[in-house]
């Protein structure tokens, strides 16, 4: 076969949510037919490193018969640990009308695989009883529960939304964690939220009903690489100024099938590629920090922000291949690691005071936007893990605040995993 010069484009990543561990779609036609239900293609900011998608090579260590003898290498396991996948963080992609549930998207399916917990809420409206900006009734049956999020919109405002979290419920009455930046009144919209939260049972036990494994198909250079029996982990959330917010991910898989004889034929895709572009960080982006137990918003001027998600995945390594395609792999669990939020902020001695007294904080980083474009990263309980670090950012003084997120202690929730999750991604 003669070599040819081939463009690296198009570059496509497709994810298939396996119903049987390590069993990918049977062929290209099966990949294409699964799109939109159990498989999605994504427009990524950056893709997995193709160079890592290859079988291991093992040296033959037998003693040699003569000085110059060498033996051919032994073909090793086809396990893959790969990084570099980055997708844009964005909202729910459309507005959800009153009394309706958020429509599922491919981005939501991806988030659910990564966190193992996800709920799609139902929209409502503020009713006639308004006791305060944090205590009021809502209409309909939106599945009220402690820890549930809404995106509240001022009916007489500019059409943008703010995230609020339900602390208590009683019939149609709710109290929320903070007062929005307007006076709450009857008719204000309570847009449904999507919450991706940590389900620790599913993360630590891959046989749990909420756990999932994936196959992936990467198209590049006119060829395709297929990986199966894998999991994706969220490493960091990056918020570059004036650029797209992004979720940075890595993956581990039980088997890779590279291009070549016996490899995959490229599917003929007919569905819709998933993944919005998101909005530039800095325009409408907010960082709010408040003391736990208070309802007052404090918007910080933040120079930079990085979230280390925690919960790295780990392979259950074996010397067997029980399910087909699961070479040396029995499944996946998760390791214990801290969830941290690092913020560079302008100098304020209050942060040192918070360190001195061990003040617990609610930390919410969010995008104020119209319905469909909203997102938030939320930690219900966070504490400084070290004293603020003072330095310079250009010609300005700055402090670096390193928060460690902790599980929430909210009581009364029906969905306890959602209520206590130490960090969440919230879409609206």
Image (cartoon, helix red, strand yellow):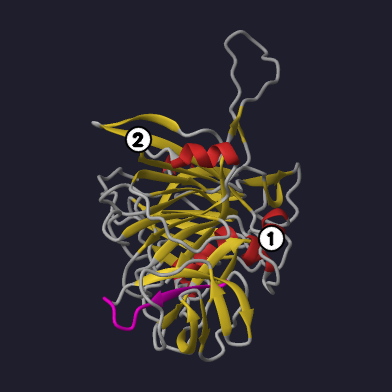
Residue at the (60%, 42%) spot, across then down = 358
Q: Quadrant of the N terminus?
A: top left
**Which one is closest to the eye, mark 2 or mark 1?**
2
Residue at the (61%, 8%) spot, across then down = 67
Q: Is residue 31 left or right of residue 374?
A: right
Q: Does the residue at mark 2 contact the one at mark 1 (Cβ under 8 Å)? A: no
Q: Answer with the quarter of the image where residue 350 lies.
A: top left
Q: Secondary structure at mark 2?
A: strand
Residue 19 location in percent, x, y? 64, 69
Residue numbers of the magenta segment: 148-158
Q: Quadrant of the C terminus?
A: bottom left
Q: Residues within 10 Å of mark 1 (few under 14, many from 20)?
A: many
Vertical position of residue 29 compared to residue 22: above or below:
below
Residue 299 location in percent, x, y? 37, 55
Q: Answer with the quarter of the image where residue 268 lies.
A: bottom left
Judging by the rendered image, the residue that carries numbered circle 1 is 202
Give the mark nearest the N terminus, 2 or 1: 1
Q: Is residue 65 left or right of residue 162?
A: right
In this rendering, does residue 24 appear at all? no
Q: Which is nearer the eye, 353 or 267?
A: 353
Q: Residues within 10 Å of mark 2 (few under 14, many from 20)?
A: many
In this rendering, does residue 164 appear at all? yes
Q: Secondary structure at mark 1?
A: helix
Vertical position of residue 222 compared to residue 90: above or below:
above
Residue 231 location in percent, x, y? 59, 54
Q: Point out which mark residue 368 bears.
A: none
Report if residue 59 lies within the magenta region. no
Identity of the residue furthest to the top in this view: 67
Q: Point out which mark residue 398 bears.
A: 2
Q: Answer with the quarter of the image where residue 183 lies.
A: bottom left
């Amino acid at each position: 076969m003669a070599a040819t010069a081939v463009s690296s484009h198009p570059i496509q990543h497709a994810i298939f949510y396996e119903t049987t561990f390590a069993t990918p779609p049977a062929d290209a036609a099966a990949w294409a037919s699964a799109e939109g239900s159990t498989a999605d293609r994504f427009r990524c900011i950056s893709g997995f490193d193709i160079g890592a998608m290859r079988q291991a090579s093992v040296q033959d260590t037998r003693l040699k018969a003569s000085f110059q003898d060498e033996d051919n290498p032994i073909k090793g396991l086809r396990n893959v640990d790969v990084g570099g996948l980055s997708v844009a963080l964005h909202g729910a992609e459309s507005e959800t009308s009153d009394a309706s549930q958020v429509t599922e998207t491919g981005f939501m399916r991806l988030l659910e695989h990564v966190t193992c917990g996800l709920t799609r809420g139902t929209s409502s409206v503020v009713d006639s009883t308004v006791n305060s900006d944090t205590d009021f009734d809502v209409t309909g049956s939106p599945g009220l529960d402690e820890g549930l999020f809404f995106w509240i919109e001022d009916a007489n405002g500019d059409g943008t939304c703010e995230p609020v979290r339900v602390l208590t419920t009683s019939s149609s009455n709710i109290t929320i964690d903070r007062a929005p930046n307007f006076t709450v009144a009857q008719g204000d919209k309570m847009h449904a939220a999507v919450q991706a939260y940590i389900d620790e049972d599913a993360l630590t036990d891959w046989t749990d009903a909420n756990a999932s494994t994936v196959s992936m198909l990467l198209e590049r250079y006119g060829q395709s690489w297929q990986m199966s029996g894998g999991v994706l982990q969220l490493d960091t959330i990056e918020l570059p100024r004036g650029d797209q917010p992004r979720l940075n991910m890595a993956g581990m898989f039980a088997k890779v099938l590279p291009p070549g004889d016996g490899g995959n034929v490229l599917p003929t895709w007919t569905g819709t590629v998933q993944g919005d572009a998101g909005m530039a960080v800095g325009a409408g982006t907010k960082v709010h920090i408040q003391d736990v137990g208070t309802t007052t918003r404090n918007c910080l001027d933040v120079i930079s922000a990085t979230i280390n998600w925690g919960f790295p995945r780990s392979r259950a390594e074996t010397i067997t291949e029980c399910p087909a395609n699961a070479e040396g792999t029995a499944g996946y669990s998760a390791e214990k690691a801290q969830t941290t939020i690092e913020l560079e902020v302008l100098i304020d001695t209050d942060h040192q005071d918070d360190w001195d007294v061990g003040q617990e904080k609610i930390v919410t980083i969010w995008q104020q936007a119209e319905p469909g474009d909203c997102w938030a990263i939320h930690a219900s309980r966070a504490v400084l893990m070290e004293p603020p670090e003072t330095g310079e950012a250009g010609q300005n003084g700055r402090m670096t605040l390193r928060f460690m997120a902790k599980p929430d202690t909210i009581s009364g929730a029906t969905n306890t995993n959602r209520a206590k999750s130490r960090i969440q991604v919230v879409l609206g």
